[in-house]
Image (cartoon, helix red, strand yellow):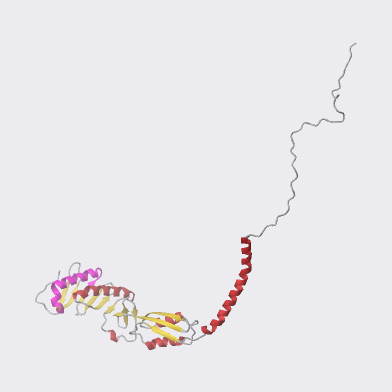
Amino acid sequence: MLGLMIRDQRAGRTAGRRNAPNRGAVRVTPPAPRSWPRLSMPSVNDAARRMQQLLWPLLLVVLGMGLYELANRLQPLAQRPISLINVEGDLQYIDRESVHQSIEPYLEESLLTIDLEALRADLIAMPWVASAAVTRVWPDQLVITLDEHLPVARWGDSALLNNAGRAFVPEHIDSFEGLPLLNGPERTKRRVMQTYQQFNRLLRPYGHRVAQLELRDRGSWFLTTREGIEILLGQGDVVEKMQRFLTIDKLMLSDRRELIARVDLRYSNGMAVAWREPATIQSGSNE
């Protein structure tokens, strides 16, 4: 008879203990130590910034008080009238009495309230004043520096020209009749003066001097020397034409200048001479 044996697979195991499931390794982290809050010390930059914030209002108050005190101290000086006015400059034609009359309305002003630009404008309006400068000198003085026009020529019948070609009208012009007489359209004053100065430099080494110079409306130039010689230059290349005349004058005409009435240089490469009286030798009329 066959026996039947059944083995219990759980036999031999400890009762009540269950097999733990197969798991991976687990690391147990110890608890972190308790941290206490840190007390941070203020930095140097923060301290400086806070100090500035506290000092600025104080500085502004001190500055305001200082300015107020300065204004109180200066106020009496600011209201102090001008006690001395110095007029400087090499004055030959400017009338000092006229200068005083221009200054007189400003004498009651204080040094700080006087209108320097208005005073300067009044001075420049005087006929002989070319430029003026007005300077304050603390505490109660003014210095006025004046530059005169340098008369070089007459312009028409009532005005004079300075060396820059600027016209001015003095009260008395009769005493300047010895100056050269220049004429031309009003807008050409400077150009006429520059041309006059050119001709003077050319003529002087040859013994000629300019008595009159005129620029007519159509652009033609007419010159008269001190010897009374009329020179017709026409338009264009006037300096070259004058040099042509001086060359021929030196070679052929210098010993008979008192006989020459007119020289016409309105030719491309020659000139014509008109005599005051018949000359025995007609030379230099075409070359």
Image point (44%, 88%), residue name: 104
Q: Is residue 217 visible?
A: no
Most common secondary structure along the magenta stretch: helix
Residue 126 appears at what percent x and percent y? Answer: 38, 83
Q: Is residue 30 left or right of residue 273?
A: right
Residue 220 appears at what percent x and percent y? Answer: 26, 72
In the picture as drawn, the residue positioned furthest to the top comes out as: 1
In the image shown, does 212 or 11 lie closer to the viewer?
Answer: 11
Residue 259 appears at what percent x and percent y? Answer: 14, 79
Numbered circles on residues, count: 0
Q: In which quadrant is the N terminus drawn?
A: top right
Q: Is residue 271 left or right of residue 110?
A: left
Image point (21%, 71%), residue name: 242
Quadrant of res 190: bottom left
In the image shown, does 36 or 275 lie closer to the viewer?
Answer: 36
In the image shown, does 267 or 61 lie closer to the viewer?
Answer: 61
In the picture as drawn, the residue positioned furthest to the left comes out as: 280
Q: Is residue 22 left or right of residue 7?
A: left
In the image shown, does 98 or 188 lie closer to the viewer?
Answer: 98
Image point (25%, 78%), residue name: 212
Q: In which quadrant is the C terminus drawn?
A: bottom left
| Residue 58 forms part of the magenta stretch | no
Quadrant of res 172: bottom left
Image point (13%, 76%), residue name: 255
Q: Which residues are magenta?
A: 232-258
| Residue 256 forms part of the magenta stretch | yes
Q: Is residue 269 left or right of residue 172?
A: left
